[in-house]
Amino acid sequence: MFRIDSFRNRLLILFAGMSFILGLCITLYIGKTASVQMSKSSGQTLYIAAKSISNTLANSLTEREREMVLLSQSPFFAEADFQNPRVQQQLDQVKTSYKYYAWIGIADPDGQVAVAADHLLQGADVSERPWFIHGSKQVYLGDVHKAVLLAKKIKAINPNEPMRFIDFATPIYDPYTKKLKGVLAAHADWSWASHVLSSSLSENAAQRGIEVFIVNQQGEILYPFKSIGQVQPPVSKKHKANYFVDNWSEDQQYLTTDVPVLSQTQMNLGWHVIIRQPMSIALAEVKSLQHKILAIGFILSLLLLLMTYKLANRFSRPIETLAQSAHAVEKGQEDIRFATQTSIREIKGLSHSLQSMTDTLLTQKHQLLDANATLEQKVAERTHELQVANVELAHIARYDALTGLHNRRAFNDYLSYLFTQMSRTEQTYAVLLMDIDFFKKVNDSFGHEVGDQVLQRVAEILPTTLRITDFVARLGGEEFIALLPATTLEGAMHLAEKIRSAIEQESIIDNHPVSLSIGVSLAQVDDADMNDAIRRADQCLYRAKQQGRNRVISLITDATDCLA
């Protein structure tokens, strides 16, 4: 049944006479939308291209710096003699891995090039070069500059432009003295920028009038070389839109985008990637369309203004009232009533439905808040319990529960590290294998509780007699072991005697002496595996037991030498 008070039917009646105007309005809307979308699309295209170039530049800078830092921190460079041919070979390989490395080398603390790829500049004095001055103190990234020492020694990748470089430098510290050992540096050919741009732009970019510029922090053009001194980029403005229009101090407008190069390097060069396109090219199609619809649009706009005004006042006011109430509920108000002054049945029904829905949602909201509060408390409690359990598990996995010293697992990990380091650097280490004398007799005479106290007291004394660089662990039962990095056999014997004497002098059990027997060995470069040194220490410990206990024995010392 057709009802006149229906909102839908009233709209049908009113808009039936407006159908021909609607067609004109659509035409105008399409023209306007096309203009906006074309401008937005062109600007967004330029912005995406600039962003892609910026990201590629930033990633490349970050990767080159990270490569330099990793090389400088590697044990190979930090511990090796720069005159070692393997250092020269390694630099040659790094330079070959990246074709834009024009030079890579290491300067000693006095600023003289000690070693370099292809022997370039080897022996040259670079103490006055910025990369050496700054690179001897911190990780350094130098801005684009002309070649000074290398201009006549290498062939330019791009012969049409003067040779320019970007500098990467980082200090190399001696891992033991922590003093400056040298400066690792590399010069990357700036023609690398051309490669980045060619891979990021479409093939017809030049036909569409698109030009790309890379500028430094001072607004000076770094790329392309032909534009240096010929083109004046607009002043960089922070917090601007993705694209904007500027005349570039010329006689035409350009659609422009300016994107900073945000690398993850320790120094920010402040580069920007700027792309421009003439507005006449970017909006050529839109201009033609706008001219066609301008005449019709003017007349239709007047008619539309009148019709829209009447329709808005008559039909949209009730809906706006409901919308305002809905926004109030959205902002958190809970005492809102959806009441409208209208004779349209559908709007009245909508008002009642919204009111009922709001009441239901508010009730559910309060129930959900109560449930969330309880749930968050339970989650927090469980999370805390898991964190505590994880900490306890991590400690149990690497420490002995009775003595608090490192356990066998932690000892094996550190022994593997020392053995691997020895194979690279030929830096040996010493092993002290210690056993409490007559420990079974202690347990039998005084009980296991006293035996545990003896183990704990010995475990307390051992770290106090060792150096901060030494590692001590309980292997099991009454047996302990210590690893002494970078220690001679003589030094290990002296330290072992110090431990033995400290235990002997300590009154652990009243009227009952407690002593240690210690076997000492030195790891050898030709050891087949990491347990060879421990086996030798075990043989020495066995000899110490045979010779009366409470003594230190090594394979090259006799019993008399080892007595305290």
Image (tube, rainbow, N blue to C red):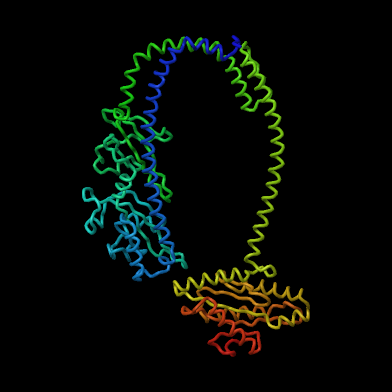
Instruction: Establish if 331 lies above or below 476.
Output: above
In the image as oriented, which residue stretches furthest toward the right?
A: 446
Classify the position of the C terminus by image quarter.
bottom right
Image spot of residue 278 (x, y percent) = 29, 31
Residue 2's image quarter?
Answer: top right
Q: Is residue 28 left or right of residue 534?
A: left
Residue nearer the viewer, 307 or 328? 307
Classify the position of the N terminus by image quarter.
top right
Instruction: Establish if 475 lies above or below 318.
Output: below
Residue nearer the viewer, 91 or 169? 91
Q: Is residue 564 visible?
A: no
Residue 123's image quarter?
Answer: bottom left
Query: Residue at the location (70% across, 42% down)?
Result: 375
Q: Is residue 307 visible?
A: yes
Instruction: Establish if 545 lies above or below 139.
Output: below
Q: Is residue 484 left or right of residue 90?
A: right
Residue 102's image quarter?
Answer: bottom left
Image spot of residue 190 (x, y percent) = 30, 50
Total numbered labels: 0
Residue nearer the viewer, 204 or 168? 204
Query: Residue at the location (58% across, 14% down)?
Result: 7
Image spot of residue 13 (x, y percent) = 52, 10
Query: Residue at the location (27% across, 62% down)?
Result: 120
